[in-house]
C-alpha cells in the first residue's frame, strides 16, 4: 500500500489517511461490516500475517487464487466501529511486505 500512497497525487501518508477518513465517514454508516481486499503472493506465511491483523475482530473470509496460483486475493468482511478502525487495519496490513491493498 505504501507505493499507492506515495504515488497518489504526491500526498504524504498522513494526508492520504486524512482524506480516506473523510471519504469513509461520508460514505459509510459506522459501526458496520466493511470489506477489505488484499492481494498477496500465495505464501501461507504472508496470508497468516494478514489473518493475525483480524484476530480480535468478527470477520468472514473469501480467497481466490490467480490463474497461475502465484497470487491469492483475500476479501475479508469485518465488523468495524468507525473510520479510524478501518484505517488502523490498513496501516497494520500495510506493514506486511508484499501485500497490495485494494
Image (cartoon, rainbow, N blue to C red):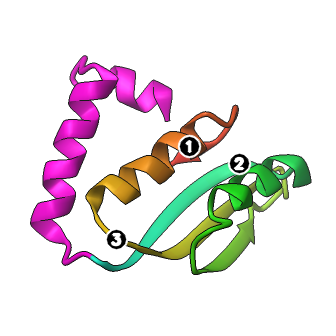
Q: What kind of element bears circle 3?
A: loop
Can you tell which mark lies on residue 15? Answer: none
Mark nearer the viewer, 1 or 3: 3
**In the image, is 91 to the left or to the right of 33?**
right
Residue wearing tag 2: 40
Can you tell which mark lies on residue 92? Answer: 1
Residue in the foreground of this view, choosing between 13 and 41: 13
Can you tell which mark lies on residue 81? Answer: 3
Dot 3 crowding, Cα within 10 Å, few <14, some 14–19, many 20+: some
Read off the magenta span.
Answer: 1-30
Q: Is residue 18 magenta?
A: yes
User: In the figure, 83 relative to 14: above or below?
Assistant: below
Q: Which quarter of the picture shows residue 59?
A: bottom right
Q: Earlier in the sequence, mark 1 or mark 3?
A: 3
User: In the figure, 88 relative to 15: above or below?
Assistant: below
Horizontal and vertical percent position of residue 48: 81, 56
Horizontal and vertical percent position of residue 71: 76, 52
Q: Which quarter of the picture shows residue 34?
A: bottom left
Amino acid at each position: 500500500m505504501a507505493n499507492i500512497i506515495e504515488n497518489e497525487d504526491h500526498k504524504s501518508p498522513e494526508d492520504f489517511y486524512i482524506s480516506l477518513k473523510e471519504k469513509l465517514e461520508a460514505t459509510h454508516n459506522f459501526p458496520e461490516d466493511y470489506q477489505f481486499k488484499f492481494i498477496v503472493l500465495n505464501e501461507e506465511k504472508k496470508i497468516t500475517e494478514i489473518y493475525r491483523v483480524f484476530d480480535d475482530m468478527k470477520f468472514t473470509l473469501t480467497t481466490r487464487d490467480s490463474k497461475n496460483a502465484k497470487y491469492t486475493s483475500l476479501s475479508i468482511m469485518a465488523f468495524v466501529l468507525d473510520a479510524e478502525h478501518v484505517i488502523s487495519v490498513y496501516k497494520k496490513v500495510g506493514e506486511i511486505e508484499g501485500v497490495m491493498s485494494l
